[in-house]
Image: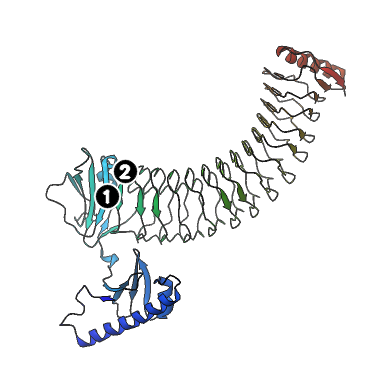
Amino acid sequence: MINSNNGILNHTADAKIASEIAQEKHILETAILKTMQKDRFGNVSVDGLTTALKNSAEVELIRKKIVVTFPSERSYEVDYDGNINDYEKIDIASLSIMSNTKFRNSISTYKGNIISVKVLNSLNPPENPSEIFDVSSNSDGTIKAWLIENTENEGYYDLFIGGKDGVRIDSCSQTFKDFSNCISMDLENLYTSDVTEMGEMFNNCKKIGALDLSGFDTKKVTTMGNMFSGCNNLETLDVSSFDTKKVKKMSQMFQGCKKLKTIDLSNFITTSLEEMSYIFYQCNELETINVSNFDTSNVQDMSYVFASCTKLKNLSLTNFNTENVSKMFRMFAFCKNLTSVDLTSFNTKNVKSMNAMFQECELLETLNVSNFDTKKVTDMDSMFYKCRKLSSLDLSNFNTESVKNMGGMFSDCNNLTSLDLSNFVTTNATSMSYMFQNCGKLSSLNLSSFNTSKVETMVRMFINCGSLTTLDLGSFTMDSCTNVAEMFSNCLTLNNISFKNSAFTNITDSHGMFLRTPSSITIVVSSDSTIANGQKEFLTARRQESGLSAPTYINN
């Protein structure tokens, strides 16, 4: 069970030291036995050993190794099967420091031609490297980076970074950014205990397939934004040991990791997190994302957080604290396989943008947004666009008094059969273009509360609403509207419209307004004869432009 490789127990060892070592190993063996007996798989774990040793030694995970250090400052490595080996701790504070700035400047012209990266715990560059650079922070030659021409790929290089016992780096900001042809990185001997910035560290490493960062010390890091963004080929990523207690920025952290199928974030503590927009954007292969441990109480922007996670099926966000969030645009957009999402804990009192929030969530059959506070929201453009399987939507709690853009809000919700928007206050709305476009099954639509006095465009507002027979637009006014092109186009069964308050005096584009509508239609116009005459002239002309007869008019 015990292997001694470093000569501690040699023939010259002092008897007292030998006795102490024997005692330490005996204590450790006993603790290992207790740990393995309690573990259901019979393995050794950090937590198990910590409990079994009862504070008689320090237990820590160092670069995937369980290391036990006694008060004597002697350390032992314990593997998961319970074997003990002597372990010599590296004094990280004594390592030479690599300047991240010097490194990036030195290899800037080569970064697109680097095939592999390896960090060494020695400084033995070959005699004739293709290039060699002093990248030590003190310019004393203690850390060097060198390039060796890759034997299999002409014009490409293998990059080595070496220093005695390893390389301690001062910052990881953009360190390997745009290493776009690099296929492997061995960073085992890179020490990051001083690092506060890791933003864009691997940004645009398009060909890297696996990254093992289990040895990274991230306890001082505050920035991880764009850390892996654009790693299109990344399939395996180990960030399970990351300490994220101080991290404030995670925006775009995994953006564009299109081949990443799983990611373990169970150890992430995000109490300091402020920025997380786009964090999982375009993670096309992720089927599940467990963020149940995320503390989002300080986050203000959740735009695109899960957007384009096209294989994501279920999502529980009951732990999300969103009371400080002001932006949720496209938060779940293009989640084409999402069938359920629990948003019951969402506090949206400060949200201003819900633009395209659920755009193209094509398999979402139910959506409970009854708890949404929308009084500050100004943009709902395309909010439910292409939610093709939603058959009903309760928006009775929505306060829309601040909303300016409602364009495409329900466009292509072609399974909705009815929609009651009688509570909508639209006094500030300026756009309603495409609002109900392609809602082919919509047969009932209550717009009785709509005030359209500021609306400038109603282009294709009801186009392809083939099941609508009646539209009461009696509350509509067209004072500011200039464009009603194809407004009712393809409303094949629409035979009754009320337009009693619309004068149409400022319309500049009305082409196809009644294109492919029934040959006969009844329209309610104003009781004021002067207004009614103007309405009749305008509407008759629009019908005739599409080859249709004049409507039957009823004065309100």
x 20%, y 57%: residue: 142
Q: In this image, 2 relative to 489: left or right?
A: left
Task: Rate crowding at label 2 as few (under 14), some (14 to 19) or many (20 or more) other CA atoms within 10 Å.
Answer: many
Please name the amino acid that badge 2 sits on.
Answer: Phe
Q: Are marks 2 and 1 in contact (CB under 8 Å)?
A: yes
Q: Is 444 located above or below residue 111 in the figure?
A: above
SS at badge 2? loop
First-in-chain label (2 vs 1): 1
Please name the amino acid that badge 1 sits on.
Answer: Val
Q: Is 459 located above or below residue 152 in the figure?
A: above
Q: How many marks?
A: 2
Which image quadrant: the C terminus?
A: top right
Instruction: Name the colouring of the figure.
Output: rainbow
Does residue 188 show up? yes
Q: Is 370 located above or below residue 524 in the figure?
A: below
Quarter-wise, where is residue 550 in the image? top right
Q: Is 318 located above or below residue 281 in the figure?
A: below
Residue pointed to by mark 1? 117
Where residue 537 sits in the image (x, y, percent)?
79, 13
x 30%, y 44%: residue: 182
Mark carried by residue 405:
none
Does residue 446 show up? no
Q: In this image, 319 relative to 159: left or right?
A: right
Quarter-wise, where is residue 383 in the image? top right
Where residue 543 sits in the image (x, y, percent)?
74, 15
Determine the residue located farthest toward the front in the rendered image.
Answer: 41
Residue nearer the viewer, 381 or 84: 84
Task: Rate crowding at label 1 as few (under 14), some (14 to 19) or many (20 or more) other CA atoms within 10 Å.
Answer: many
Residue pointed to by mark 2? 179
